[in-house]
Image (cartoon, rainbow, N blue to C red):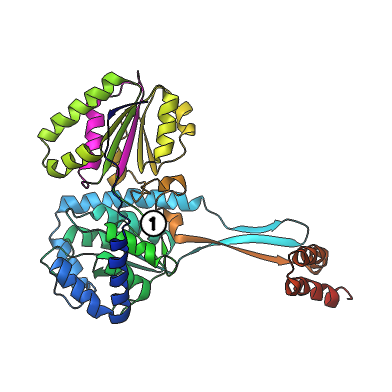
């Protein structure tokens, strides 16, 4: 492998100071509840509202601030996301009456979590697409209480109207104007205005991420996520267009100065053409201030000796988004095992998945794709087992269980099996 463009090493976001700061925020919210949330809103967002929950009138007012085209776009995207979530849910089925031995009946139920919070970031852009990506799968899963929250627009008391409308279209039952680590703490432990939930999902900055990490156990979470990532595999002879690859790398780069775009190819000419095209497109990009810093610091172009090596590099990186432009996708794709979401062929832009194709864009980063996929309808579903057995099956299995329990030295466990055999074996 040859490095054509090298990225800076990631700086360590998991600092002791960050952990301590977030821990202090969580403690303050646990002790002081809404008082702490209101103070943090004022400090971080210049938001002085005291009623944190968004009422119906405020939601309706937000609809008036969103254009008819934007509403139509949101509803169409929601339709695609909902359809895919419903198709995914249909693949998950209850299991009944499975017998390991005659008379031992096993099964499982699929049960939605009772409540969740969908955290939608604020910051530089109104990420209303994220509101759809989080609330719709929760709704399809059957979560009874879906809450959503987001920081207010800085200097105001309101969530961005497009974000607020998207939360409503997605099916949120309760919406709150609060963000940051303090919001995670509030939904984990509860305050006077906010009842706690069972699970928090959604991306956020390093404070939100650390709060999710610290509150995990008290609540369930989707995963601990970091800055956005895309990796593109482009094989020699597959017709990859450097302008398209450059555009896709910059689409990630404009998210955040910490975002990462990677090209892995076995074609050095293509590699250098992509670098040149990135520079040309940056010159005309309105978000170049952010995108150029991301590309300069974390953009990476790697020249692989072969497609085989490109696949190995990709699996090692375990990227959030993976684009594949290769000669034989059917042969290549089964060898790709670590990614959040896969985009196959040059027609299939990663940004289509970001907004409207129907797959979810809330995906694992920082190599978490080695062990988890992204948010989906199953994120909100629990697979819970059950069993029942006949008397004869109990008599037959009790000896096995007794032997194993005594082998572990757990005599009360053994007796719980043996006593049944003693009582019912005489009848």
Viewer-closest of 79 and 143: 143
Task: Tell me: residue 354, above or below residue 303.
Answer: below
The reply to whether residue 334 is in sight is yes
Specify whether 233 is left or right of 385: left
Indicate the secondary structure of the residue bearing disc 1: helix
Q: Quadrant of the C terminus?
A: bottom right
**Measuring 42% from the left and 46% from the top, which residue is drawn there?**
369
Mark 1 crowdedness (10 Å alpha carbons): few <14, some 14-19, many ≥20: many
Could you tell me residue 25's position as x and y percent?
28, 71
Q: Which residue is mark 1?
A: 137
Look at the image and give the residue range highlighted in magenta. 229-257
Viewer-closest of 375 and 356: 375
Q: Is residue 195 magenta?
A: no
Q: Quadrant of the N terminus?
A: top left
Viewer-closest of 137 and 416: 416
Task: Tell me: residue 325, above or below residue 69.
Answer: above
Viewer-closest of 160 and 204: 204
Could you tell me residue 69's position as x and y percent?
17, 50
Q: Quadrant of residue 194?
A: bottom left
């Amino acid at each position: 492998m040859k490095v054509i463009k090298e990225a800076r090493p990631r700086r360590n976001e998991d600092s002791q100071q960050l952990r301590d700061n977030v821990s202090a925020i969580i403690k303050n919210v646990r002790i002081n509840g809404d008082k702490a949330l209101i103070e943090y809103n004022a400090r971080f967002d210049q938001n002085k509202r005291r009623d944190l929950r968004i009422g119906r009138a405020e939601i309706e007012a937000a609809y008036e601030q969103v254009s008819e085209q934007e509403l139509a776009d949101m509803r169409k995207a929601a339709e695609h996301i909902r359809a895919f979530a419903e198709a995914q849910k249909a693949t998950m089925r209850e299991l009944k009456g499975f017998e390991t031995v005659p008379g031992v009946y096993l099964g499982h139920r699929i049960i939605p979590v009772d409540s969740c919070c969908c955290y939608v970031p604020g910051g530089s852009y109104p990420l209303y697409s994220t509101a759809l990506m989080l609330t719709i799968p929760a709704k399809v899963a059957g979560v009874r209480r879906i809450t959503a929250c987001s920081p207010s627009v800085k200097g105001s008391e309101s969530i961005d109207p497009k974000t607020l409308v998207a939360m409503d279209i997605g099916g949120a039952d309760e919406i709150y104007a609060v963000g940051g680590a303090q919001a995670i703490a509030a939904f984990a432990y509860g305050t006077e205005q906010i009842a706690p939930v069972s699970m928090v999902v959604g991306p956020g900055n390093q404070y939100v991420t650390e709060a999710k990490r610290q509150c995990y156990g008290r609540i369930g979470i989707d995963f601990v996520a970091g800055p956005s990532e895309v990796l593109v595999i482009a094989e020699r002879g597959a017709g990859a267009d450097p302008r398209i690859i450059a555009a896709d790398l910059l689409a990630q780069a404009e998210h955040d100065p910490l975002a990462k775009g990677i090209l892995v190819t076995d074609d050095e000419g293509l590699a250098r053409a992509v670098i040149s095209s990135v520079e040309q497109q940056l010159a005309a990009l309105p978000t170049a201030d952010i995108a150029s810093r991301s590309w300069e610091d974390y953009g990476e172009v790697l020249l692989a000796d072969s497609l085989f090596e490109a696949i190995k590099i990709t699996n090692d990186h375990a990227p959030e988004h993976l684009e594949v432009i290769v000669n034989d996708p059917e042969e290549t794709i089964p060898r790709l095992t670590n990614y959040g979401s896969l985009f196959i062929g040059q027609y299939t832009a990663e940004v289509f998945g970001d907004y409207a194709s129907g797959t979810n864009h809330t995906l694992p980063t920082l190599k978490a794709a080695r062990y988890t996929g992204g948010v989906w309808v199953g994120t909100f579903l629990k697979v819970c087992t059950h069993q029942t057995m006949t008397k004869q099956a109990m008599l037959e299995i009790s000896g096995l269980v007794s032997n194993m329990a005594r082998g572990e030295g757990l005599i009360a466990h053994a007796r719980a099996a043996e006593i049944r055999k003693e009582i019912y074996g005489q009848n």
